[in-house]
Amino acid sequence: MKWLLKKIKSFFRFCAGKILHLFRTKHFAQPDNELLQACQDGDVEKVKSLLNKIGVDVEAKDYCNNTPLHLAATRGNKEIVELLIQHGAEVNTKGGGGNMPLYLAAKNGYVETVQLLLQHGAYANIEVRESTGTCALLHLVIKKGYKEIAQLLLQHKASVNVLDFDNQTPLHLAAKEGYKEIVELLIEKEADVNAKDYWGYTALDLAKKAGHQDIIQLLTEHKEEVAKIETETTSKSAVLTESNIAQLDGQSPIVH
């Protein structure tokens, strides 16, 4: 019951934030300075001209609390994003709804902009708020099927086994949604195939429920391989322990 109440409260908080954002966007859509306006319009030449002026504020905020970098990242305008960063824009600043530029670029699928932000120090392990609760940015992009962005986040140290509001890992989501290439990517990055979510399901369980045969085969084979490696490791450890004990006793180890 507590879990259900928590999800309901999270949903209403999310809705309230969206309504406030829409209200502000509708009534205060125009930014309050030229740089914000140029970034919103995607006017590269205007942005260049403004950035060359003395005293320009690259951290100016509009009525939704977004900076020029937020506006450029939302539209995937890589050239403007790069110009702003070159002029000192903070890549991890929080804007409307507490969102960072990386989140805005990633959720809209702008691969090159995501790559650029990560190269300049954007945090890969950021938490985002969805209608059903909080999760990692990696969860969000995997749910959308953005393999290239998921790969970029993992390359920049995003946690492969991070949990969302349902205690599901990125592998759970990829298996459930049927994204085989993303499942392969996560396995390559050593995702825990035995991890269980809030209801006790593994990624394989979710793949079976959804009927994704190719993923079922892939996860089954990998689980068998992991089990084999664990068995071999345990066996070697047992032999080494027996050998060490025998040496301490001044005896030769027993050879089977």
Image (spheres, helix red, strand yellow):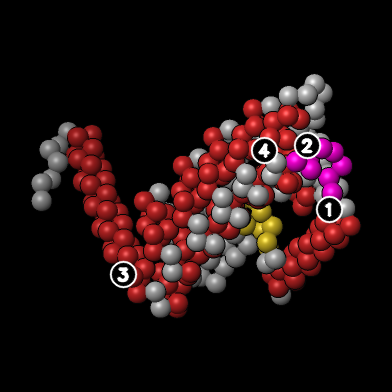
Q: CA distance from mark 2 to mark 4?
A: 10 Å
Q: CA distance from mark 3 to mark 1?
A: 50 Å
Q: Which residue is mark 1?
A: 29
Q: Are marks 2 and 1 in contact (CB under 8 Å)?
A: no
Q: Which residue is mark 3?
A: 217
In the image, residue 196 sits, relative to residue 66, either above or below, namely below
Amino acid of disc 4: Val
Q: Earlier in the sequence, mark 2 or mark 3?
A: 2
Q: Is residue 104 left or right of residue 167?
A: right
Q: Which residue is mark 4?
A: 44
Q: Earlier in the sequence, mark 2 or mark 1?
A: 1
Q: Nearer the viewer, residue 88 or 165?
A: 88
Q: Earlier in the sequence, mark 3 or mark 1?
A: 1
Q: Earlier in the sequence, mark 2 or mark 4?
A: 2
In the image, residue 71 sits, relative to residue 88, either above or below, namely below
Q: Which residue is mark 2?
A: 35
User: Would you identify the image quadrant in which residue 140 lies?
Assistant: bottom right
Q: Indicate the secondary structure of the residue bearing disc 4.
A: helix
User: Would you identify the image quadrant in which residue 35 lies?
Assistant: top right
Q: Residue at x 57, y 43 (%)?
A: 113
